[in-house]
Amino acid sequence: MNTLSIASTIFVFAATAALCQETPPNATANVLKGRPYSPYADRAYPERVYFGDTHVHTSLSADAGGGGTRLMPRDAYRFARGEQVISNTGQPVKLERPFDFYMITDHSDGMGAITDIISGAPNIMADEQGRSFHEAFNQGGEAALRAAQEMTASFAQGTLSPALNYQPGNEAYERVWDNLVTIAEEYYRPGVFTTFAAYEWTSLVSGNNLHRNVILRDGPDKTRQLVPYTTTPPMGSPNPRDLYTWLQTYEDTTGGDALAIAHNGNLSNGWMFSLVDDFAEGTPPLDREYAELRQKWEPLYEWTQYKGDGEAHPFLSPDDTFADFETWDYGNLDSSERKTKEMLPGDYARSGLLRGLALEAELGVNPYKFGASAATDTHTGLTTVAEDNFFGKFTAYEPNPERAVHVGRRFPDGEAAYYSSQYNAAGLTAVWARENTRESIFDAMERREAYGTTGPRMTVRFFGGDYDRDALARRDLARIGYSGGVPMGGDLAAPPDGDAPDFLVYSLRDPNGANLDRIQIIKGWIDGESGEAMEMVYDVAWGGDRSPDAAGKLPPVGSTVDLSIPSWTNSIGAPELGTVWTDPDFDPSELAFYYARVIEIPTPRWTAYDAVKFGTEMPEGTLMTTQERAYTSPIWYTP
């Protein structure tokens, strides 16, 4: 792949001369001492970056199949590995470049039911709600989309008929899981294309989105021993603590390995990063046991996806010029409750990281110590994150002249909650690993050596430790990074003599994409005097002949976008950026985290391509350009 071949000339070093056991990055500080002359010999750090989607739904998910999706898991895998397929609306579709890994995460609740609903199985037709959904789903179009949304709302509000909510013990439920495991194994090609047995645990309390994608590291001999956990009592539970118990049971029973990735929380209405136990009577404060469990089982969090970006919010970060990006802040998942400003800190990654520091100061453990991932949450079986190849979240939003001018959902009083033009063509997870295998990719996710992008495949390295100013004069940045500190996802030790840590950050643009505008480092910390959570955004590297103004703000990079085509030119920005940056405000007594944000120059958004391809007149206020970006996993400092 072009991304990897170009990256290899920078710091990834093409082929390995001698294989060695993979060593956790935090343990590689002495790797370079006594090294052979050849810089490629005996390497013990992750050397390649791999891109994939960790959140994909096919026709087997009720809200996908009910809405008209007919692509099945084999279709999704064929598409992801680079084959051309026919979409759910009969259109040919193909990726520009195949993905390296892929995780089909169909919903565990109701698994196997949608096929019976659409076909009109006797047990479905004997149920009033089942007959209604059967008729709407087979009608297709707008009726099917609204019925799929109604099914989601019924599930969220606890009014879905038990006849439609298949659970463990149901023959169809267990058959579908067995087939998903079989097909994942069928398409697994170690070194070329990696698949995982996975599912989405769909906790949706009164419409507040607490979904988790459960990823299993193992093959069929282990993944078939237990069926997926659900949220419906008595077989399941919507409480994350009970999911953690299932994950532990899976590992104890099979000897395997599992983790969970929380769904982008911008539709959780404050529940994703809550300060209290919303499932306990009286909602007491979170305790140390919960903090330990969540940190253990959820090493990554989904920062961005089709339903908006979840890094930051302009209300929470008013001094951050780039915080208002693809913002979804209307309410919860089923639009049953509007969003209030008080809910926002519990919805976004940066505020979640800050709350984690505050809880660590109180409990001694940080429950929100998560790295960065990104995914699509596609419900078409197609992962299409390129703006000029966007096939939408649902079948109704596959390319057509009207798809960008549709009311997505309405509040109970009939007011529009959001519009279809707000869907965001994002995102992908990138991991640093030794090889493209289940074991290596899973282990990278588990140690948080991962980052998320809104679609482009830019290469990003981020290290914290002790580095010379001239580190960027060399091209073997990975060796320098690992030998002098820790990578993204790692922990900084207390510095000698209280010296401020250095951060080595580097990014190379997607070879088929846009130049880079800037690299920023975002710091969050707990003020030692006030005890308040604080944040700061630092511009540390940028393209073009620009300088920060008197207020310290870097001017915009400009724009070369031509909406009439639409297209852009790479005559501004830079193809690669990097620097060694030292925290000028470091206090060795304060808890802190740091992560890098890489931002591209402006490019046309998918709505701009629709306007030209279909002649669609976009409503006033529709976003027509975007600045794609990447978010690295943080590096934490603990006194």
Image: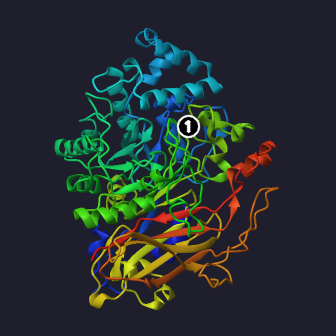
Q: Which residue is mark 1?
A: 380
Check the image and report above or below for 166 versus 384. Answer: above
Check the image and report above or below for 131 versus 513. Answer: above
Please state which amino acid type lies under the numbered disc 1.
Thr
Q: Quadrant of the C terminus?
A: bottom left
Task: Give whichever of 28, 452 is nearer the camera.
Answer: 452
Task: Give whichever of 414, 405 is nearer the camera.
Answer: 414
Give how far across and how far down residue 330 sits, in percent.
56, 45
Q: Quadrant of the N terminus?
A: bottom right
Say if residue 142 shows up in the picture.
yes
Looking at the image, which residue is at 38% across and 17% down?
163
Q: State the SS at label 1.
A: loop
Crowd around label 1: few <14 · some 14–19 · many ≥20 (10 Å): many
The extreme left residue here reads 252
Give how far across and how far down residue 471 sits, in percent.
46, 87
Check the image and report above or below for 303 versus 637. Answer: above
Looking at the image, which residue is at 31% across and 21% down?
170
Q: Quadrant of residue 45?
A: bottom left
Q: Quadrant of residue 565?
A: bottom right
Looking at the image, which residue is at 70% across and 53% down?
623
Q: Is residue 221 left or right of residue 624?
A: left
Give how far across and how far down residue 273 sits, in percent.
38, 53
Say if residue 13 shows up in the picture.
no
Number of labelled discs?
1
Q: Is residue 133 left or right of residue 39?
A: right
Give how far across and how far down residue 429 sits, in percent.
47, 56
